[in-house]
Image (cartoon, rainbow, N blue to C red):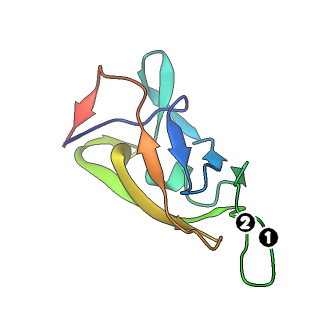
Amino acid sequence: MGFVLATSSSVRCPSQGAVSPAGQSKLRVANRPVARPDGITGRPVSGCTVATSNSTKQCTSVVSASGAAGKLKVGNVGVALDTLSGGTDGTTSGLSATAGQSKLKAV
């Protein structure tokens, strides 16, 4: 089980780059639209702190996101949970998430 991600949730790359999830207005938590993994995949990453060189690349976008609820769905797709994982296009690929709310938990 995990807490549901919303547009106000924190999604980050390992080097502290931030991702702003796109929301689904049909379901809200803490007055914010919930997010699905497809609202995180393809989104830009800003503020990645990796120093770009010949052998390193800053994260600029999310290439994959997984970690959806099996039962709680919006538009027949599971909502994203704070157990989210995924990757970016940067050297320090990976994602972590903090829901920032404790009202809605899903399995």
Q: Residue at x 73, y 83 (%)?
A: 55
Q: Position of residue 94 (x, y in %)?
A: 50, 64
- The answer to whether residue 77 is visible is no
With respect to residue 15, does 69 lie above or below?
A: above
Looking at marks 2 and 1 on the same chain, the residue that comes earlier in the sequence is marked by: 1
Nearer to me, 58 or 65? 58
Q: Amino acid at mark 2?
A: Gln
Q: Position of residue 79 (x, y in %)?
A: 37, 44
Q: Position of residue 40 (x, y in %)?
A: 55, 52
The reply to whether dot 2 and dot 1 touch (C-beta < 8 Å) is yes
Residue bearing mark 1 = 52
With respect to residue 9, does 47 lie above or below?
A: below
With respect to residue 54, does 67 lie above or below?
A: above
Residue bearing mark 2 = 58
Q: How many marks?
A: 2
- The answer to whether residue 37 is visible is yes
Closer to viewer: mark 2 or mark 1: 1
Query: For the residue labelled by badge 2, is the local secondary structure a helix, a strand or a loop?
Result: loop
Crowd band around label 1 with a 10 angstrom C-alpha radius: few (<14), some (14–19), many (20+): few
**Quadrant location of the C terminus in the rendered image:** top left
